[in-house]
Image (tube, helix red, strand yellow):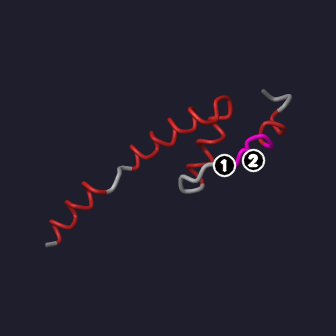
Amino acid sequence: MKKLFKALMRVLTPSQRGTNNDLLIWAKTEYNQDWRFAYQHMLDNNGQAPKRADVHIQNDNLQGWV
């Protein structure tokens, strides 16, 4: 029974690599130039996307460095 449960869990739960790839695609699609910030934010916050205001604030802090 344990083996069956483990096999089902392996099939039904997404791999971490697949999830990270989905987050990367989402960040690049939705946040254009700010995709790096958005991707890192989602990795750090369990997949939760940053608010648009957070992305704008991040850009203001980077002016002069980029």
Q: Is mark 1 on a helix, strand or loop?
A: loop
* Contact flag, marks 2 and 1 (Cβ < 8 Å): yes
- Within the image, what quadrant is residue 52 found in? top right
Tell me the residue at 63%/42% (across/down).
Answer: 38
Q: Where is residue 58 in the image (x, y as percent from the top left)?
A: 77, 41
Q: Which amino acid does label 2 sit on?
A: Asp
Q: Residue drawn at (70%, 49%), measured in percent from left and top? A: 51
The N terminus: image quadrant: bottom left
Give the vertical position of 38 relative to 7 (above or below). Answer: above
Which residue type does callout 1 highlight?
Pro
Question: What's the residue at 75%, 47% (across, down)?
Answer: 54
Query: Which residue occupies 56% across, 32% down?
Result: 29
Quarter of the image for the C terminus: give it. Answer: top right
Region in magenta: 51-57
Name the residue that disc number 1 marks: 50
Relative placement, left or right, of 31 versus 66 is left
Magenta: main secondary structure: helix
**Left or right of 5: which side holds 23?**
right
Q: Seen from this angle, which residue lies furthest bottom?
A: 1
**Circle 2 sits on which residue?**
54
Between 29 and 63, the residue placed more toward the observer is 29
Q: Which mark is residue 2?
A: none
Residue 52 magenta-highlighted: yes
In terms of secondary structure, where does tag 2 sit? helix
